[in-house]
Image: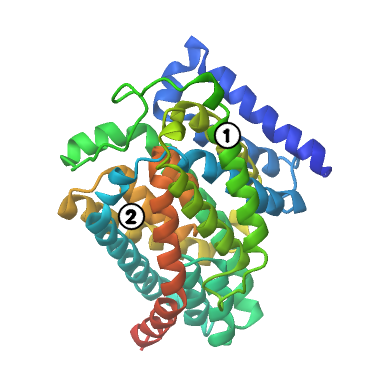
Amino acid sequence: MIRSPALLLAAFVGVVALVLHARRRGAFQAVFRFLPVPFWCYLLPMLGTTAGLFPSDAPLYGALSRYLLPFCLALLLVSADLSAVARLGARALGVMAFSVAGIVLGAVFGFVLFQDRLPEDAWKSVGALSGSWIGGSANMLALKEALSVPDAIFAPVIVTDTLLAYAWMAFLIAGAGFQKRFDAWNAAAVPTFGLAGVSPAPTARPGFRAAPLLAAIGAAGFSIFLGDRLPALGTAVTHATWTVLIVTSLSLALSFVPAFSTAGGLTEKWGATILYILLASMGARARFTDIFQSPRFLALGVVWLAVHGLALLAAARFLRAPLALLATASQACVGGPVSAPIVAAVYHPSLAALGLLLAVLGNVLGSYVGFLTAHLCRWAAG
């Protein structure tokens, strides 16, 4: 098993390089048309962890999320089209409401369906998991304390959360290859996300080609420095949350500089490369064999996410929402502030900011809605 941080990072970079090389090969074009590059960058390390090649927990993983994610966000957002994000406002909130409602309904329905096969007080652990799937891990830990969840029934929740959350993330990433067909089928109201090439951008002067890269690096470094020094606000806003909020704000402010917007393709290329490496490190945190450790909670979780998915489909039809927005809102709930911008950026870099904002909203609501969900399960159980 590879445990050296340097070798682990080299392995993830190698996986990304291999996938990018395969994408350019004609024989694999059909495969990548349905399962895009991010999906393979995520899946292959997961297979490596299952086979014992990578550890499921290593200091490198947290370090990459802590320090590499701000650089990724800065590079992706420095040339963002804010007008496109603004046009998603009301519809985005509506889809997020459906997403949260789907988590609550899925929790109650799944618990009622499996309550006879679950241990006593399982409603408490379901409430804790709902906090995670609305706001993130901090909410889950807060609810564990608030609901006095016994360790014996909390451990299976950790396995279920880890396995299904990453599996759901992989499912959403894979969906990026189908968004055009889905949106056409749904007659979705798809805004222009500021894609490079939609309209010809002015050519940057040679002296300014490196300016957006340097500005993004500076914004990320300053955000990490300041985020570590700002106070945490309960469980909703941690030091990492501050860092992501600051780097997002700075990068979006820089996007108003005309000289930076002319090099969007350059910054997006670097940002996408870092994004793929982050996905590889996230994929390595889960293994398929975890499925056998908590089959009952896992079965409940599968039903739970199925109901959540149905709620998203309802949002799609009722709000004519594009698949990119559905995936972003879903990952904002199930994944949280770290992974929501990543999944959003897989669909298009301009959505990374929206992914973060929706995830922060879920983070704020998670403990309250999770507490409500727990007691709804208790009430439904009679």
Residue 66 picture quarter = bottom right
The residue pinned by badge 1 equals 213
Up/down of 38 relative to 325, above or below: above
Q: Is residue 154 left or right of residue 26?
A: right
Q: Nearer the viewer, residue 303 or 158?
A: 158
Determine crowd level at label 2: few under 14, some 14-19, many 20+ residues with C-alpha closer than 10 A: many
Q: In the image shown, does 248 or 238 lie closer to the viewer?
A: 248
The number of callouts visible is 2
Residue at the (28%, 61%) spot, across then down = 93
Query: As drawn, is 2 to the left or to the right of 199?
Result: right
The quarter of the picture where the C terminus appears is bottom left
Q: Give the residue drawn at x 32%, y 48%.
A: 85
Where does the image place residue 70, in percent across and percent down from the top left?
Answer: 59, 49
Query: What is the C-alpha distance between the residues marked 1 and 2?
Result: 38 Å
User: What percent of the width, then of the height, locates residue 381?
Assistant: 38, 84
Residue 92 drawn at (x, y percent)? 28, 56
* Above-or-below relation of 137 to 153: above
Q: Give the crowd class for mark 1: few <14, some 14-19, many >=20 residues within 10 Å.
A: many
First of labels 1, 2 by sequence position: 1
Secondary element at image label 1: helix
- Position of residue 74 relative to residue 144, above or below, is above
Q: Is residue 233 visible?
A: yes
Q: Residue at x 46, y 59 (%)?
A: 334
Q: Is residue 375 above or below residue 110?
A: below
Place residue 185 in its image quadrant. Answer: top left
Report which residue position mark 2 lands on.
309
Q: Which mark is residue 55?
A: none
Disc 2 residue type (three-letter) = Gly
Helix, strand or loop at label 2? It is: helix
Q: Position of residue 268 (x, y in %)?
A: 49, 32
Q: Are marks 1 and 2 in contact (CB under 8 Å)?
A: no
**Amino acid type, label 1:** Leu
